[in-house]
Amino acid sequence: MQSFGLIHFFQTHIAPMEIVSDLGQMQDICMRARIDNQKIALVPTMGFFHEGHLSLMRWARLNADQVVVSVFVNPAQFGPGEDLDRYPRDLERDSSMARSLSIDFLFVPYAADLYPEGFDTWVETQKLSKFLCGQERPAHFRGVTTIVCKLFNLTMPRMAVFGRKDRQQLLIIKKMVRDLHMPVDIVGLPTIREHDGLAMSSRNAYLSPRQRKEAANVYKGLAMIRQEVLSGRTDRLELESLLGNYYRQNIPGAVIDYIQLVNAETLENASRADNNTFMAVALKLGRTRLIDNIELGQSTEDA
Ligand code: PAF
């Protein structure tokens, strides 16, 4: 039994990673894998991998027969004046990192194929996409849900893996999948942090050394709030103002976009912190937008 498992592992994982750009080819490969009863996991990314991405890929490798990692900097989720042009890219480095994790396919589609002349169909989760980041980035989540839906259609995964740092994105994708009966399990994995607590993000590469040092306080403030909640302080307005003061003192260069205690499913303001709430923040440090969040109950996964 054990040796069969080993043979099966080598049969499915010994092939070198393939880089696929053609949409039809990706779809054919995945269609054949599905007919062969292979469980496909998709890890959608915008590339410039860090340990956060790698943790998603490792999970996918352990839980699926075929792992597809997509790398696509999706223009539809960037607003005017945002960082689409300077978003960090390094496909060579990404490929070798993915290869070292025995990923089966690196899917690197072209924008001109995904959004050809005349493209006019959007997928939008109406309510959830208006809160938090949706206030400052009104078309962002429509771009995310549209590309994720396309990637699902192109790779036909049984499961797709996302990080909980982008918690609003994760909720919105789960909602899209439920509302549209998409046959995909959405897996949300914990935020991976630097040694000082900063949530890993490709955008951290923009930070100057001084900003990078200050940025660690984004999470330190959230951890402080969690401690306050555990010691009995639960009023939303009190907690939000405590965190605002902490950021003004400890990240004086930052512009606070939002600090909000929200219900973990609806994203509406919660009046008190409890097991079903999280504190979400977004700050601009120079030209870099940082987001993070923390669960606030006794039994949290992100503590
Ligand atoms: O989280 C991201 O990197 C992107 O929003 C995603 C899910 C790959 C869609 O472009």
Image (cartoon, rainbow, N blue to C red):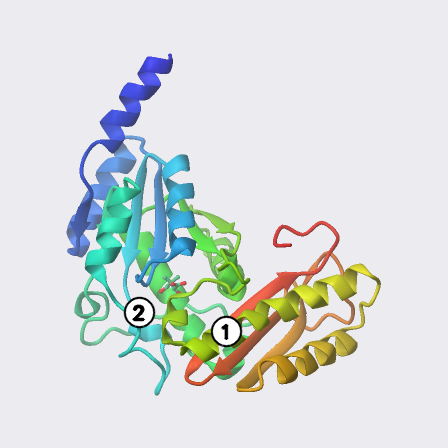
Q: Nearer the viewer, residue 247 or 131?
A: 247
Mark 2 residue type: Asn
The amino acid beneath tag 1 is Lys
Q: Which corner quadrant of the image does residue 239 belong to? A: bottom right
The residue depicted at 37 percent of the width and 82 percent of the height is 79
Please indicate, yes or no, whether residue 267 appears anywhere in the rendered image. no
- Judge from the rendering whether residue 132 lies leftward or rightward of residue 34; answer left or right: right
Point out the quarter of the image occupied by ligand 1. bottom left
Instruction: Quickly name the residue at label 2.
Output: 74
Residue 249: give x, y in percent of width and height: 65, 83
Query: Residue at point 22% right, 37% down?
Result: 32
Location of residue 33 in the rendering, given as x and y in whole percent from the top left corner = 25, 36
Q: Position of residue 170 (x, y in %)?
A: 50, 59
- Location of residue 59 with respect to 195 vertically, above or below: above
Is residue 143 visible in the rendered image? The answer is: yes
Q: Which residue is mark 1?
A: 213
Location of residue 226 in the rendering, given as x and y in whole percent from the top left corner: 71, 63
26 vs 219, left or right, is left
Left or right relative to 165: residue 38: left
- Cα gap from disc 2 to disc 1, whole angstroms: 29 Å
Q: Please tell me how many numbered marks the rendered image carries.
A: 2
Counting residues from the start of the chain, the first of labels 2 and 1 encountered is 2
Q: Secondary structure at mark 1?
A: helix
